[in-house]
Image (cartoon, rainbow, N blue to C red):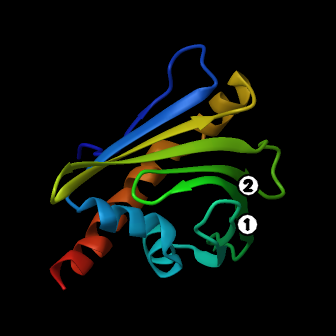
Amino acid sequence: MEQKTKVTAPEGAQEVWIKREFDLPLNLLFKAYTEPELVAQWMGTKVLKLESKRHGSYQFETTDPKGNAHRFNGTIHEFKPEKQIVRTFEMENTSFPIQLEYLTFEELTPTTSKLIIQIVYKSLSDRDNMLKLPFAFGINMAHDRLQKIVSRLNQE
């Protein structure tokens, strides 16, 4: 099956680009990233904190099949409703350094929208180590769930 979320890692660059078009109006795509209940559903994670605002922060927790809890957190540096979120992302208690994420939301039509994420890593080796994980597969699964869950809101 074709993966709808495209992940590209330009050669020699400390970044990854993630692009996906959704059959969702822009406002609902943005809500999927800013409302704790929706984030928890499509990401399959516990949202411990999500302050969707400039200078806000977030913390998520997921549990692996062995029952181990893993936490992720960050600070929101820029928040432009239905346009852009700039935030840091840290996987707690790992060797991965903090990364910087630029999330850009675009309306394509009144019923479709696009998400573009640029992730900047501290080094090329940090980026390459992240890509050794099932990164592209995981983001595709999550975005597929986002489309399915948020589509239900669009029908209400």
Taking the image as shown, residue 99 lies to the left or right of residue 33, namely right
Q: Nearer the viewer, residue 122 or 133?
A: 122
Q: What residue did someone put label 1 on? A: 71
Q: Earlier in the sequence, mark 2 or mark 1?
A: 1
Residue drawn at x 19%, y 55% as measured from the top left = 112
Count of marks overlaid on the render: 2
Q: Is residue 5 above or below residue 25?
A: above
Q: Quadrant of the C terminus?
A: bottom left
Q: Which mark is residue 59?
A: none
Q: Could you tell whether 31 is left or right of 130 in the image?
A: left
The answer to whether the residues at label 2 and label 1 have Cβ atoms under 8 Å apart is: yes
Q: Amino acid at mark 2?
A: Met
Please say if 59 is above or below 117.
Answer: below
Q: Quadrant of residue 111?
A: bottom left
Rate crowding at label 2 as few (under 14), some (14 to 19) or many (20 or more) other CA atoms within 10 Å.
some
Residue plotted at (63% across, 72% down): 51
The answer to which of 130 and 143 lies nearer the viewer is 143
Which label sits on residue 91?
2
Q: Nearer the viewer, residue 33 or 142?
A: 33
Q: Residue at x 68, y 65 (%)?
A: 56
135 relative to 75, above or below: above
Q: Residue 28 location, x and y as percent?
A: 32, 68
Q: Quadrant of residue 13?
A: top right
